[in-house]
Image: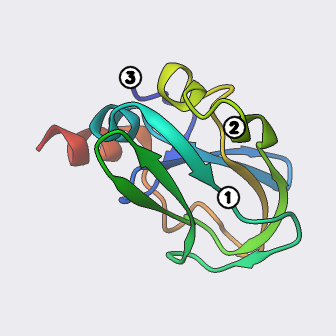
Amino acid sequence: MIPEDLYYSEEHEWVRFDEDIATVGITDFAQDQLGDIVYVELPAVGDRVEVGSVVGELESTKSVSDIFSPLSGEVVARNDALDGGPEVINSDPYGEGWLIKLRPVEEDPTSALLEAEAYSALVAD
């Protein structure tokens, strides 16, 4: 399940653009690889993040994995609902399981991201 209207990073984050705000989450492929997610650590609102930097972590019954920022910018929202129910990332990774919202600073924030077809090829290997 790889929605066509999103952009993707090679580290398995997805990005949805709405005006000047980018919503970020992890892909269905990533949540499936992680297994049952039991804890999420996210950056604070107001934090500045750089593309490729570690911005948090996901703890599952299998492992702990870093969350990488697919864009540079300022965190304008975090999904506080995940503090009490991180398992929603497993059941709805492209909806209620979103992680953070950023205001990107890149002039063309999509330039370093993959479109759905390219991400499909990446995870098919």
Q: In x, y percent, where is residue 63? A: 32, 51
Q: In x, y percent, where is residue 69? A: 57, 66
Residue at 38% across, 22% down: 1
Q: In which quadrant of the rendered view does residue 47 lie?
A: bottom right
Residues packed near mark 3 inside 10 Å, few (<14), some (14 to 19) or many (20 plus): few
Q: In which quadrant of the rendered view does residue 66 lie?
A: bottom left
Residue at 65% across, 26% down: 95
Residue 42's mark?
Answer: 1
Whole-number angstrom distance, CA of label 2 to CA of label 3 = 22 Å
Question: Where 56 sits versus 60, above or below?
Answer: below
Residues packed near mark 1 inside 10 Å, few (<14), some (14 to 19) or many (20 plus): some
Q: Amino acid at mark 1?
A: Leu
Q: In x, y percent, where is residue 109? A: 65, 65
Numbered disc 2: secondary structure: helix
| The C terminus, quarter of image | top left
User: Decide: marks 2, 1 in contact (CB < 8 A)?
Assistant: yes
Residues packed near mark 2 inside 10 Å, few (<14), some (14 to 19) or many (20 plus): many
Residue at 48% across, 59% down: 113
Q: Amino acid at mark 2?
A: Leu
Whole-number angstrom distance, CA of label 2 to CA of label 1 = 9 Å
Whole-number angstrom distance, CA of label 3 to CA of label 1 = 25 Å
Q: Amino acid at mark 3?
A: Met
The residue to which callout 3 is attached is 1
| 2 or 3: mark nearer the eye | 2
Numbered disc 1: secondary structure: loop
Residue at 49% across, 68% down: 112
Residue 34's mark?
Answer: none
The residue to which callout 2 is attached is 82
Which sits earlier in the primary sequence, circle 2 or circle 1? Answer: 1
Numbered disc 3: secondary structure: loop
Which sits earlier in the primary sequence, circle 2 or circle 3? Answer: 3
Question: Where 70 sits versus 40, above or below?
Answer: below
